[in-house]
Image (cartoon, grey):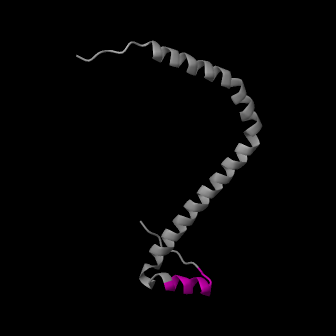
Amino acid sequence: MSKRINIILPDKTVAVLDQVTTKGNRSRFIDRAVRKLVETEGKANLRTLLKEEAIENAERDLVISAEWFPLEEEAARRAETRRSRKPTRKRT
């Protein structure tokens, strides 16, 4: 479903719009442009937020990883030991 709206654009914007699309395709072009802009800016905002939070939490994350590292190493060592003990089956 579509809805008709009236918008006012600067003359320069209309001139650019007329260069890239025909009058019959303006609505479709503007729709695509708006959706693309929202998607792009949304991703950029998300990246910015994720980066800010990563920087804010970096020290906490280092402490947590240092605490868990020995446990991860032990788990990996045990898993490797179990894999090396499993007998291999011969195919007949």
Q: Residue at x 51, y 74 (%)?
A: 30
The percent position of residue 58, horizontal first and vertical second, equals: 74, 39
Quarter of the image for residue 10 reads bottom right
Residue 27 inside the magenta-drawn segment: no
Q: In this view, does 16 lie above or below 90?
A: below
Q: Is residue 45 above or below residue 84?
A: below
Q: Which residue is drawn at 75% across and 34% down?
A: 60
Q: Residue at x 68, y 53 (%)?
A: 48
Q: Is residue 22 above or below residue 2?
A: below
23 and 45: which is toward the camera: 45
Question: Principal SS element in the magenta part?
Answer: helix
Q: Residue at x 50, y 85 (%)?
A: 19
Q: Quadrant of the C terminus?
A: top left
**Numbered label tally:** 0
Magenta segment boundaries in residue numbering: 8-19
The percent position of residue 90, horizontal first and vertical second, equals: 29, 15
4 and 57: which is toward the camera: 57
